[in-house]
Image (cartoon, rainbow, N blue to C red):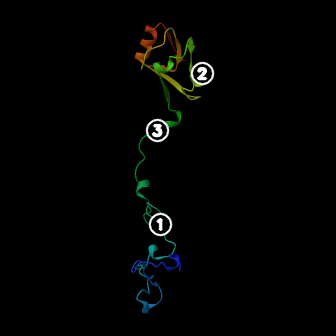
Amino acid sequence: MSILGSLTKHRGSTHNTKALGRGRGSGKGGTSTKGGKGQKARKGTPIRRGFEGGQTPLIRRMPKVGFTNTEFKNIFEIVNLNQLQSFTGTIGPDELVKAGLVSKKARVKILGRGDAPQGLTVKAHKFSETAKAALEKAGGKVEVV
């Protein structure tokens, strides 16, 4: 005899389901343990989150506050001076895109972490004061696009 054929459930691990709505004699007739009348006593009743019985919900009663202009917000991608070490001559946003340092439509801000490369002309949308000072000290130029 196989072991799989003789498997049984542990005693007490399963229960008989209650026969709801099967008359008064079952002890669970009438309202079928759903209480009195109302929306929750009906079948197919999932009520969405925040529903207040037809009353205007709290979220709609509260005033709207603030303003966001995210669609037109200026987002700058950051490039540090230490990432510009491999470049020579003049560098702009197009060269940074080809090098994979920024995405295609990004505005570029140069920050001053690291040492500035010698004699590099950098074109970007924005510069930090430390980056500007470091580039000019290293004999380079700064151009705002």
Q: How many marks?
A: 3
**Which circle's residue, 3 or 2, is located before the other in the chain?**
3
Kind of residue indicated by mark 3: Thr
Q: Could you tell me which secondary element the residue under label 1 belongs to? A: loop
Tell me residue 47's x, y (percent).
Answer: 47, 66
**Which circle's residue, 2 or 1, is located before the other in the chain?**
1
Kind of residue indicated by mark 2: Asp
Neighbourhood count class around disc 3 (C-alpha, 10 Å): few under 14, some 14–19, many 20 upward: few
Of residue 53 and residue 3, the one placed in the foreground of this image is: 3
**Which circle's residue, 1 or 3, is located before the other in the chain?**
1
Neighbourhood count class around disc 1 (C-alpha, 10 Å): few under 14, some 14–19, many 20 upward: few
Q: Could you tell me which secondary element the residue under label 2 belongs to? A: helix
The residue positioned 45% from the left and 8% from the top of the image is 138
Residue of label 3 = 68
Residue of label 1 = 47
Kind of residue indicated by mark 1: Ile
Per the rendering, the mark at residue 94 is 2
Q: Is residue 2 left or right of residue 130?
A: right
The residue positioned 51% from the left and 21% from the top of the image is 125
Tell me residue 92's x, y (percent).
Answer: 56, 18
Q: Is residue 123 left or right of residue 54?
A: right
The residue positioned 60% from the left and 21% from the top of the image is 94
